[in-house]
Image (tube, rainbow, N blue to C red):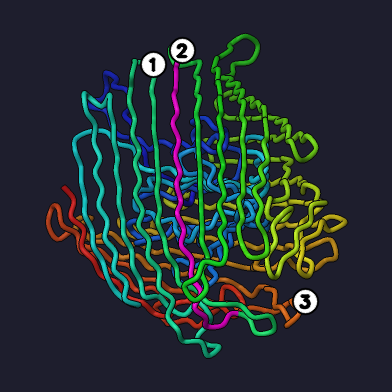
Amino acid sequence: MSALRVALFGSLCSTPVLAQSQPIELPPIVVSATRTDVPLDQVGSSITLITREELERRQIRFVADALRTVPGLSVARIGGVGSQTLVRIRGAEANQTLVLIDGIEVNDPSFGSEFDFANLMTDDIERIEVLRGPQSVLYGSDALGGVVNIITRKGGGPLHSSVAAEGGSFGTARGSASLSGGLAEDRFRYSLSAVRLHTDGISAASERRDNSEKDGYDNGTLSANLGASLLDNLDVDVVGRFTDAEREGDGFVGGVGAVDAEEDSATIQRFGRIQARLALLDGRWQHRVGLSGADSRTDYRTDGQKVSSYDGMKTKIDYQTDLSLSTQALLPADHTVSLGLEQEREEAILTSAFSDFDRSITTRSVYSLYQVALFDDLFLTAGGRFDANDRFEDATTYRLTAAYRIEETGTKLRGSYGTAVKNPTLFDLYGYDANFRPNPNLEPETARGWDAGIDQALFGDRLSIGATYFDQRLDNFVSLAGQTVVNLPGESRIRGVELTAAVALWDGLDLTASYTFTDSQDPDGNKLVRRPRHQAGADLSYRFFEDRATVNLGVIWVGARNDIAFDAAYNQSIVRLDPYTLVNLAASVRVTGNLEAFGRIENLFDENYEEAFTYGTPGRAGYIGLRARF
């Protein structure tokens, strides 16, 4: 959104009255809204950008923490660093948030089709796009609530390298290194990254409830982004990511909640994609074909003995073609027509004392999107999708968007309407453990939703504000019922308001803020759990010392929300979690041309809070480090 705009600079064409060209600010380009490159100010969907510069200024180490101030998103981490971390968009379930890393769908079929953000760090990330609202037309089943699209750094240019190390509270030590560049005038490009993190951690079971055993966490992540221009119009890209993480955890007892115990887990994640892009007709006709794979395996241990193993695999082959053309007769317009074909196979393998199954689902899809720009001010899209699934009935979804710019007043009006479908997860259908029974009779969830918003620039673009109203309705909502899950009869409704603001107070001093109101109810009018009705965030950043030093003050406020408690027989009841406020302070200074010193304090005022009932959260923590760039 305009509150988080990226500055991309171009040049004015020279004229006889100008001695030299002057830089102008262009809107950033986004990909996720249409699966093509589109300027943000032409997008009718609600979308937020998080840039690498923002991640570095705030010293964000995990992607989930970067999402906490995005309007419409709620984040819940069940314990300390490395614990299960789920993201919900506009009140939808976590398994209705599709997560992409360089085009790879990384939602885990063995993990309820959710993506656990616990292990995803920010070191190699260039930008994050958060697309809100039903997005099944372009992305299929898992995108009922929206999409988090993560794009890593690409190589190119002269050789660049960096190393960094930091340490601090809870016995935390972290080191990272990166290397990037290009060869043969950038016909071959590479970007490599490695990071290692260790922390002694906190008790996963809340210390405020008399738990004290520390639960540590280790994470090692390697990533690569490689590209080659084989011909002037043919590019091939290969990306890969490998994560090896181990987490100590605690147990759960009905009637009590989380308790100290000798339980831990080991996770291996492998994500990869190879993609070829061919441009014809001077770039007006684009072709893209790709093969993606994601494999996430987690082994759970009690007292050092493995008790269960979850392995989720997703393989996708996809093709998309985009044809762009302009017409001048009758109505001047620019048109883009996209057509896509996909085949996706999801497989979940679960092994435990209670269950042993290997199940898969294959979906074949075709989608199309039409984009038209009229008079350089009005931008419309219309799209549809057909999914043929070998387990459920075939599904058809559609989506419409509109954006209208008023250049004279700096105003953008936007709106969207779409439908979506979410298939039951393999675990819900077939999974089984000590406290859960599957339901093979589940039916897909369906949704329809709309939003309308306005973005306004004021005072020569020094102030940008935005407001959005959204309304989404779900049928066949899958809900926990005792020790199983069922489709709730009737309609669930989620609606709310998202507000954003960004202001340049004076040179070097910038303020951004957001607020979200969410009213989420099941068919019986009960509030959905872990969805705060009110939440807000703000960041105040100051650049000084000729931009060699920065200070960033961040505030996150989360209102009261419901959660679930279980009695000794695992019957559920509703509990209320208190609101909380987190204040984070980060600062950095470039000591020399290559060396930077940085430090931060998280939870500055030592707030005592819970994001999940009976689970712990870190208190005040401090970290310092050095980074060298070459």
Whole-percent x, y for residue 77 in the image? 53, 68
Spatial CA distance of label 1 from label 3 is 61 Å
Q: Is residue 272 magenta?
A: yes
Label 2 residue SS: strand
In this rendering, the answer to whether 183 lies above or below 198 is above
Q: Residues within 10 Å of mark 3 (few under 14, many from 20)?
A: some
What number is the disc on residue 304?
none
Q: Are marks 1 and 2 in contact (CB under 8 Å)?
A: yes
Q: Residue furthest right?
A: 489
Residue 529 visible to an observer of this rendering? yes
Q: Secondary structure at mark 1?
A: loop
Q: Are the residues at dot 2 and dot 3 in contact (C-beta closer than 8 Å)? A: no
- Pointer 3: what residue? 571
| Label 2 sits on residue | 280
In this rendering, the answer to whether 357 lies above or below 264 is above
- Mark number displayed over residue 233: 1
Kind of residue at disc 1 = Asn
Q: Is residue 199 magenta?
A: no
Give how far across and how far down residue 535 sits, in percent. Answer: 59, 67
Amino acid type at image mark 3: Asn
Q: What residue span does the magenta drawing correspond to? A: 258-279
Q: Is residue 457 left or right of residue 447?
A: left
Binning the other alpha carbons within 10 Å of mark 1 as few (below 14), some (14 to 19) or many (20 upward) gives: some
